Image (tube, rainbow, N blue to C red):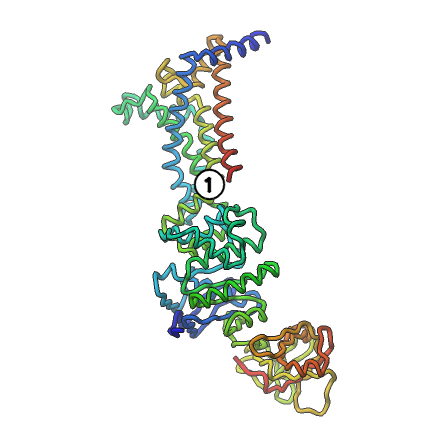
Amino acid sequence: MNKTPLYELKDIKHTYNRFMLRIPELIIERGDSIGLAGPNGSGKSTLMRLLALLEEPAHGSVAFHPSGERKTSVTMLQQDPYLLKRSVYDNVSYGLKIRKDRRSLRERVAESLDLVNLDPAKFMHRSWYELSGGEAQRVALASRIILKPDALLLDEPVANVDTESSYAISEAVKKMREMHSTTLIISSHDISWLNNITDKVLKLHNGRITGAGNINILPGPWIKGEKGLWQYTLPEGYSVYATEPPEPDSIGILHPHEIIISDRKVKNISAVNKVPATVKLMVKEEKTGSIRVEADASGRIINIEITEESAKKMQIIPGKKIFLIFKATSVIWH
Amino acid sequence: MEYLAQGFISAFKLLISGDEQTYSAVFTTVKASSLSICISLIIGLPLGFILGYYDFPCKKQIRAVVDTLLALPTVVVGLLVYAFVTKKGPLGDYNLLFEISGIVAGQVILILPIVVSLSATAIESLDERLKNTLITLGATGNKIILSSLFEARFAIMAAAVNAYSRAIAEVGVSMMIGGNIKWHTRTITTAIALETGKGQFAMGIALGIVLLCIGFFVNWVLIFFRKRA
């Protein structure tokens, strides 16, 4: 795979709603598969719009180095896609028709529909209003896949679809990448899904990329407490302790592997943080083989990574009460 | 009431027998209003698109003026156009007075605001996601405009039907500019006014039936296309 930059973002400052997206530097290489995760309002969609060239940044630059024509080499599937008020065939072939590329159009439309697991014979002549939400999402994806873009951007592609459509979308995107080395940039709330489909997940918070992977974000504000430690109060009142932050509103990063799970409150250990939590979700990460545990710690979801053995040994199951143990120095600053 | 019933019977006889005077008025009406709607759509659709799609200074004020012109009385249009096309007027040399072309000019002024206003509303009502969808599929410039108009096709067809209905039903412009000249500029509406004045209810009713039939046919075409789509 030819690893040359497809996107180079420099010194981006772009206002959206009441927030500002700030990205000092971001390079996305050709053929990369990048996930964007973060809560609502974190800037995922704004970053997607900049990468889709739908908007120019207010400050800084988005350099895009496509293999073909700039505007036609990137395409984005919006969270709630809009289908043109035409047949499925007309929707899927629209992008090619406006490029005046009518070679074997019917066959190519059929191939794209096949790729998203929609039977061409059954769906090709259906009207836009004869499709379910998941089918409409897949038709919208087929309309992008047929263009074979350098960059395919998907904004929350499986947020509002059924399991069958979610699986079909995942498979189509994977095949698309395999077949055409397409650069994928996908935003989603579903970290497990992102981990499964992308090579790297960037976490956004308040318009900043705070890190990669399953990191936990502790957004502050941080208040000076006892023994030179600073404390952040979780939504339901429990406090987390850390070393002195650069600013009181600095974002604290807590890596999942820095957290130890205990099924009882442990005394006589140096770690100051012993946060009670409830296991909400357990997912086996296909790439690493580890178990990602999502736990509700006083109103905030914290990711922890444990081995399958540990999970079995401690009989970790959803609903189990546990303690999250980590040192104040485990919280690092963004 | 007997004369009304008699009028209806005579009207059907006139229509079935292919009365030349009746059909002359029908053809004049269809010709003038069809030309008017074609010209209005050619001018009005781009203007409506601009008004509905783009933001520019004084847009609200322009919109208010266009919307006000929807209620333009036909006789006022007739009067204005007459002032321009009469021999003494600035367009007197073009010999538009008492000609179908003069009626067409008046009807265009009458129905253009309908086309502009309703097509602007149709464009404004388009889904906000459409523009981004078109751009992300690679559309630019004219392709965005044409695709947006196509997406709004049902509302635009409704605007066209509305405007056409106003053109075929108006009497002020046809009477004042056309002059109601038999075999030449006599339209259905001017003929109804004349025949009713003369007490010739049969022809008035016959023409009224034709007018309603045209209106029904135009609306049926719109419904047909909607259902087909």
Judged left or right of residue B32, residue A185 is: right
The reply to whether residue A55 is visible in this rendering is no
| Residue B143 visible somewhere in the drawing | yes
Residue A149 spot, x, y in % from top left? 41, 62
Outermost residue to the left:
B93
Q: Label 1 marks which chain's residue?
A: B
Mark 1 highlights which residue? B153
Q: Nearer the viewer, residue A243 or A177?
A: A177
Q: Residue at x 58, y 59 (%)?
A: A165
Image quadrant holding the N terminus of chain A, namely bottom left
Identity of the residue drawn at 51% across and 54% down = A139
The residue under the point 67% across, 83% down is: A309
SS for dot 1: helix
Residue A315 placed where, x, y %? 73, 80
Against A192, residue B148 (above or below) is above
- Location of residue A272 by image quarter: bottom right
Q: Residues within 10 Å of mark 1 (few under 14, many from 20)?
A: some
Given residues A276 and B146, the one toward you in this image is: B146
The front one of B5 and B69 is B5
Q: Position of residue B150 (x, y in %)?
A: 44, 43
Q: Position of residue A300 (x, y in %)?
A: 65, 73
Left or right, A215 with respect to B204, comes to right
Q: Quadrant of residue A296?
A: bottom right
Amino acid type for the residue under numbered disc 1? Arg
Depth check, front residue: A30 or B62: A30
**Vertical side of A263 occupied by A11: above or below:** above
Examine the rendered structure and indicate whether residue A276 appears above or below residue A91. Answer: below
**Picture mark count:** 1
